[in-house]
Amino acid sequence: MLFNSIDFAIFLPIVFALYWFVAAKNLKLQNLLIVCASYVFYGWWDWRFLSLILFSSIVDYLVGLRLNQESNQKKRKLLLWTSILVNLGFLGFFKYYNFFLDNFVTAFSFFGTEISANSLNIILPVGISFYTFQTLSYTIDIYKRKLEPTKDFIIFSAFVSFFPQLVAGPIERATNLLPQFYKKRTFHYGKAVDGLRQILWGLFKKIVIADNSAQIANEIFNNSSDYSGSTLIIGALFFTFQIYGDFSGYSDIAIGTSRLFGFNLKQNFAFPYFSRDIAEFWRRWHISLSTWFRDYLYIPLGGSKGGTWMKIRNTFIIFIVSGFWHGANWTFMVWGALNALYFLPLLLLNKNRINTGVVAQGKYFPSLKEFFQIVFTFSITILAWIFFRAENIGHALSYLSTIFSGSILDFPIINISRLYILQVFLMIILFTIIEWNGRASQYALEKFGFRWNRYLRLSLYFSITLFIFMFLGEEQQFIYFQF
């Protein structure tokens, strides 16, 4: 079920009404309702894959209980590896089986040996990368004695399958989300309104910015050999806004929806395109995944405490694995490696944490130095996104070679209405202004316009809603559903 669909527009009010009007006085009933609603939400896509979530929930629930009771270290490690192998086994089969098989066959062909192997027609379960990492963090934290396991299977199932963030995050830690299922939840009008405001902004990001940027980016990327370097730059620019509007828009809708039900999820995007260096970008982009890899991969590998070689090794491992998490394609790993190259000089010069605050905080405009830092970071990010979007390595290299050719000076011509491109471009400018003004908040509209009178503020929300309906086109799946 898509957030930007009629189905969800009907589903959400029904669940909301049952949650607050029927089950409001019974915490157990509320939690059970969340589980049922979450399974309906996920099963709407393909009910057959509900068995994966259920099986994963049962395994990690039992492993968690046993880990807490077991004192023998060897047995505790065996339990932990049971959880890891089950979860990563499912993820590896559904997401990476054909990738490894195809590359295995190619490797043998390279050395002159032809072998035949049949790929499987595997359907990738939506959100498997997200809920797999969520359950893994639960068992790892119990193993490290950082968390007490829950004995309530309904609560644990609700934590694993919580529908607002089930299929595309944020990847919640049990230490934050799980305790909220134990607390009595009462309806709070202010939080609900705040949640609706964040949902509205998320829908604007998705429908107005992402989906319309996609129309232009797809035309250029899919026909890149027909266009000049200047046009390809425009394609990469529109994809940059597409992926941010799409993914951060999903996170906004998920966090806002959670707030309607009395839950607080962690911020997943903190205005990353206003970053002054690539280290700051990665502290602000997909925060729940970046911190997951930091805590469960980078730090266990030694982090930045070792010598120069260990720092370089660990940096490349975390970025390449992060790229591979996104999909079974070499383009994602090159994208990860490229970001590692961007990041490495900052790490080696010990400058990776010099920009931790909000840029130009308390000011209307950044300094000249900050402006050029933002432009530079944004530019190298765009170049990296080309590998993320390209069909394969050859496509990415061809795309880049055309950009860095003489045709970069040609006047850009796109096989799409100029009026439409101008409209989308103006919407991006409006979007960027609002995001800049709200950059110190959890999301752009959180405090935007609060000093205005009530009617002016309502006019803002009405205008955003109007833009959503004006730019509403064919229903588009969220990009990160495929991950």
Image (cartoon, grey):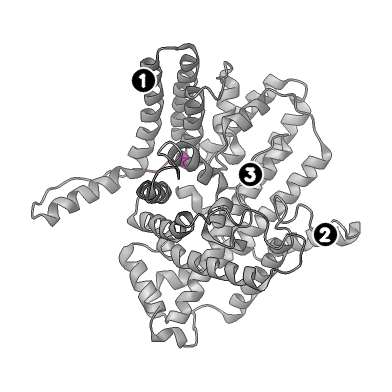
Any magenta on residue 125? yes
Q: Which element carries disc 3, helix, strand or loop?
A: helix
Q: Where the N terminus falls, by quadrant?
A: top right
Distance in Å between CA atoms under marks 2 and 3: 23 Å
User: Upstream in the sequence, badge 2 or badge 3?
Assistant: 3
User: Upstream in the sequence, badge 1 or badge 3?
Assistant: 1
Any magenta on residue 42? no
Distance in Å between CA atoms under marks 2 and 1: 55 Å
Instruction: Place residue 225 in its image quadrant.
Output: bottom left
- Mark 1 or mark 3, which is nearer to you? 1
Distance in Å between CA atoms under marks 1 and 3: 35 Å
Instruction: Place residue 190 in its image quadrant.
Output: top right
Nearer to me, 226 or 7? 226
Q: Which element carries disc 1, helix, strand or loop?
A: helix
Q: Which element carries disc 2, helix, strand or loop?
A: loop
Q: Amino acid at mark 2?
A: Gly
Is most of the magenta stretch helix, strand or loop? Answer: loop
Q: Disc 3 marks which residue?
A: 254
Q: Which residues are magenta?
A: 123-129
Task: Sort mark 1 into few (<14), some (14-19) or many (20+) by Cα contacts within 10 Å.
Answer: few
